[in-house]
């Protein structure tokens, strides 16, 4: 109940404030002629938009009615579609299997989603890819594969991408899962999180997306 109250407050107070800041920046941008001021207003609007997205992600991880594996799969797939479309990358999402009615903790949902988000970000920033395949399935746990058709892993890839790869691996191992990355016609990131970390329930037999 306390988590839901905080989530509602964030949505009502912070969300409204950030949306207002973004709107005012965009309105000022329409009439501003000074290039330097336009650059500043554009940056303010973009930052407000990014904060709104981050806030929505935090609220989603705290929401009790979005705690199932299928909820995570749908949410991650929707994010991937939007992000790849914005960056001109073709995305193919394959969501297959029998989704259990397991309840995931906020940490599980957030860590899994952030790894998918970071992998897509690295693809856009470093891979020079034109296509990404996002595959999610379930067999004694959630298995996620993110494959791009880019240039593959650069030398000393863990340093080249900063701490991103190491952080991704830590997020998954913290959940008792496994994480790997390899060059395979581009880059393939694969990770799994065991079902033993969630409370097993009924099986949702959903068709592949």
Image: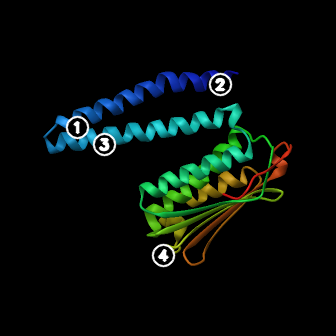
In the image, residue 133 sits, relative to residue 1, either above or below, namely below
Q: Residues within 10 Å of mark 2 (few under 14, many from 20)?
A: few
Label 1, label 2: how far apart the Cα atoms are? 36 Å
Q: Position of residue 7 (x, y in %)?
A: 59, 27
Q: Reading the chain from its start, which is encountered first: label 3 or label 1? A: 1
Q: Reading the chain from its start, which is encountered first: label 2 or label 3? A: 2
Locate residue 106: give its quadrant. Answer: top right
Label 1, label 4: how far apart the Cα atoms are? 38 Å
Q: Nearer the viewer, residue 143 or 191?
A: 143
Q: Residues within 10 Å of mark 1 (few under 14, many from 20)?
A: some
Identify the residue at the far front of this view: 207
Secondary structure of the residue carrying tag 4 is loop
Q: Name the residue tied to disc 2.
A: 4
Q: Position of residue 145 (x, y in %)?
A: 65, 64
Locate residue 181: give its quadrant. Answer: bottom right
Q: Name the residue tied to disc 4.
A: 151
- Relative horizontal placement of residue 58, taking residue 33 as reference (left or right): right
Q: Reading the chain from its start, which is encountered first: label 4 or label 2? A: 2
Numbered mark located on residue 43 in the image: 3
Q: Position of residue 96 (x, y in %)?
A: 72, 59
Q: Nearer the viewer, mark 1 or mark 4?
A: 1
Secondary structure of the residue carrying tag 1 is helix
Numbered mark located on residue 80 in the image: none
Label 3, label 4: how far apart the Cα atoms are? 30 Å
């Amino acid at each position: 109940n306390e988590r839901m109250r905080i989530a509602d407050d964030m949505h009502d107070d912070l969300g409204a404030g950030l949306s207002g800041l973004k709107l005012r920046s965009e309105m000022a941008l329409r009439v501003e002629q000074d290039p330097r001021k336009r650059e500043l207003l554009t940056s303010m609007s973009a930052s407000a938009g990014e904060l709104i997205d981050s806030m929505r992600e935090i609220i989603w991880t705290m929401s009790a009615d979005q705690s199932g594996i299928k909820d995570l799969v749908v949410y991650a797939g929707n994010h991937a579609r939007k992000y790849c479309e914005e960056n001109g990358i073709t995305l193919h999402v394959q969501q297959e299997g029998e989704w259990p009615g397991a309840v995931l903790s906020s940490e599980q949902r957030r860590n899994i989603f952030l790894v998918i988000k970071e992998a897509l970000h690295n693809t856009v920033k470093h891979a020079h890819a034109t296509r990404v395949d996002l595959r999610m399935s379930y067999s004694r746990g959630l298995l996620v594969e993110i494959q791009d058709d880019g240039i593959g892993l650069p030398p000393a890839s863990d340093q080249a991408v900063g701490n991103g790869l190491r952080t991704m691996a830590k997020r998954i191992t913290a959940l008792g899962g496994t994480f790997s990355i390899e060059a395979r016609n581009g880059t393939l990131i694969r990770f799994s999180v065991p079902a033993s970390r969630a409370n097993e329930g009924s099986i949702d037999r959903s068709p592949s997306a």
